[in-house]
Amino acid sequence: MSDKNIQTTNRSRRSFLKRAGQLAALTALTGCVPSGKSTDTVSTHSKKDGGMTYRTTPTTGDKVSLLGYGCMRLPKIDGSEEFDQEAINRQVDYALEHGVNYFDTSPAYCRGLSERCMGIALSRHPRDSYYIATKLSNFAPSTWPREKSIEMYHNSLKELQTDYIDYLLLHAIGGGGMESYNARYEDNGMLDFLINEREEGRIRNLGFSYHGDVEVFDHLLKLHDEGRLKWDFVQIQLNYIDWAHAKEVNESNTNAEYLYGELRKRNIPAVVMEPLLGGRLASLPNNLLAMLKQERPDDSTASWAFRYAGTPEGILTVLSGMTYMEHLVENVNTYSPLEPVSEEEDRLLQKVATMLLQFPTVPCTDCKYCMPCPHGLDIPAIFAHYNKCVNAGDIVTDEMDPSYAKARRDFLVGYDRSVPKLRQADHCIHCEECISHCPQSIDIPGNMDLINNYAETLKRKQS
């Protein structure tokens, strides 16, 4: 794609973006901006000059940190599957000390233990110093009866050690289409129940997270327009690939340009998930990395993606699943304060996006909704290793290629190190239980065949 065409593609994005300029005067962490739209403010809580950037929720006046703490991938004790509560506590303490106040969890995260771990960590701090976001994750038909969904909601309050939820989301709306949405929230009366909970103050902000069928997204905004309820916020997938190329990555996806635009029309703030597209935008091929380093030599590829996601007006917070302290420290610095992406940088990132799409990676975001696999496969780890090798140029099929021997060794050795043999792709039996759980609608069994066939071909070849 030519630079001229890329510039044309970006016009609609630039019409929505609020570009770089002077940030508002410093305000206190607990203050609020009396405005109907998101306004950047900064706090001195961060060590870096300027402090954390904040955005304001229009309906409640909450001043929310632009960096949101995602609680899907909590740290574990080395060599085990047990979550490291002491490490979680330390990271939560650091986050709060440096101005992060939005914590996003779910009953479905971390094998059902994320809310409990976060409840322990957060309850050590004053309740008014942080905002809890959690979800009604009633995916399974066994949870669709009204009493079961209400039980899940009440259990979230118990696990989080709180008597109210700041941001409650209908989880992963769009997966399964209108039929699934109706079964989970309309036929059982749960939507009306949640609206009443907001009226009673046990839910302060009500929203939904979206994956999948855009008909459901449009339907929920229609409910907003008709006045049945007002959404306080909506969570969408947004990054510099998904802005204009989500459907190229996966036909069932919807471009973030459309989702964001519809929310802006209604002044509904957006919470951003997958700013790194499952880590794909944190590790770019060398030629693309060089393009970004030429512009900002000291910046990581991840910081580019976070700056991009945080730049548009109306973005309330950008979620990051920060397993390690170093991720938290870097992301805090990126938003302390935010340096918005310029129009020139925007054009560069869209050029990187179109070039990155030429690499045939699997569009897995490591959400782990497909897990556990009933036959023991570590599906996200298999895809992560394959994608890493694609990005590194280590997928080579021509034995005459000078890099073939190294690429073969790197793939096979790395495969065995990152995925135990009994959990590799050759153990997939095509039961297809994983397919319905994938928000990206990936043909998981088909991709398992592709990766396994490639691995078996390499094993048969002589280095």
Image (tube, rainbow, N blue to C red):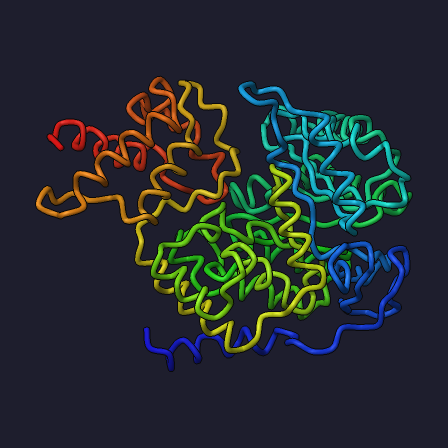
Q: Examine the image and state in which quarter residue 136 appears.
A: top right
Point 86% across, 60% down: residue: 61
Point 48% across, 59% down: residue: 242
Q: Quadrant of the C terminus?
A: top left
Q: Determine whether 295 is above or below 45 in the image.
A: below
Residue 94: x and y, percent? 75, 42
Residue 18: x and y, percent? 66, 75
Q: Is residue 228 something one can see in this rendering?
A: no
Judged left or right of residue 321, residue 201 is right
Point 64% across, 32% down: residue: 138
Judged left or right of residue 219, residue 159 is right
Q: Is residue 366 something one can see in this rendering?
A: yes
Point 76% across, 67% down: residue: 40
Near-viewer residue (418 or 183): 418
Residue 333: x and y, percent? 67, 56
Residue 124: x and y, percent? 86, 32
Judged left or right of residue 330, residue 416 is left
Q: Determine whether 121 is above or below 26 in the image.
A: above
